[in-house]
Image (cartoon, rainbow, N blue to C red):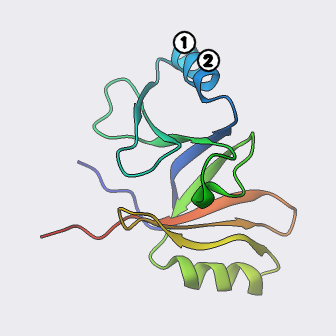
């Protein structure tokens, strides 16, 4: 299995208040497969045909406190080594932190930030592997 490189776009998320419609649309358009994320309420994992693991997700807008700030838009997420440090760096470079660092039940760390032009994207660090 190939592991993405840090500081690359390694995930995407489709935010929607109508997850059934999103699953139908993207499933029929691209053949994407969906499964409920066992660790997070209000989130589906997206897999491409032939993919070894999920590459994105559908976030149900307005359904859960940890999904606060999710709206009807798609965005990319960048894999980083340290989400908190990258949030600080984003602000130093003229961006802003829209959704501060959060940690999911599984240990995934993420934040939503905005670049100086107003483009929103996410930063994330996956959970540490368990021994």
Q: Secondary structure at mark 2?
A: helix
- Res 77 quadrant in image: bottom right
Q: Secondary structure at mark 1?
A: helix
Is 6 above or below relative to 12? below
Identified at 87% across, 63% down, the residue is 117
Identified at 46% across, 24% down, the residue is 32
Is 26 above or below relative to 59? above
Viewer-nearest residue: 70 or 13: 70
Is 46 above or below relative to 122? above
Q: Report the quarter where the C terminus lies.
A: bottom left
- Res. 127 mark: none
Q: Position of residue 25 (x, y in %)?
A: 61, 17
Q: Position of residue 110 (x, y in %)?
A: 54, 66
Viewer-nearest residue: 77 or 67: 67
Using a 10 Å C-alpha cutoff, classify the residue at mark 1 as few (fewer than 14 neighbours), some (14 to 19) or many (20 or more): few
Q: Position of residue 115 (x, y in %)?
A: 78, 67
Is 1 above or below relative to 52? below
Residues at marks 1 and 2 touching, judged by CB atoms closer than 8 Å: yes
- Res. 28 mark: 1
Residue most extreme to the top: 28
Q: CA distance from mark 1 to mark 2?
A: 5 Å
- Res 126 quadrant in image: bottom left
Identified at 56% across, 82% down, the residue is 84
Using a 10 Å C-alpha cutoff, classify the residue at mark 2 as few (fewer than 14 neighbours), some (14 to 19) or many (20 or more): few
Residue most extreme to the right: 117
Identified at 41% across, 36% down, the residue is 36
Residue at label 2? 25
């Amino acid at each position: 299995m190939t592991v993405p490189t840090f500081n690359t776009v390694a995930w995407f998320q489709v935010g929607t208040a109508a997850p059934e419609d999103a699953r139908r649309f993207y499933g029929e358009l691209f053949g994407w497969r969906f499964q409920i994320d066992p660790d997070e309420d209000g989130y589906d994992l997206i897999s491409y045909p032939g993919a070894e693991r999920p590459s994105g997700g559908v976030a149900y807008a307005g359904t859960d406190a940890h999904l606060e700030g999710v709206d009807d838009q798609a965005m990319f997420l960048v894999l980083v080594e340290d989400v908190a440090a990258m949030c600080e760096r984003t602000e130093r470079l003229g961006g802003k932190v829209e959704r501060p660092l959060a940690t999911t039940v599984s240990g995934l760390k993420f934040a939503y930030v905005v670049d100086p032009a107003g483009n929103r994207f996410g930063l994330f660090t996956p959970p540490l592997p368990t021994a």
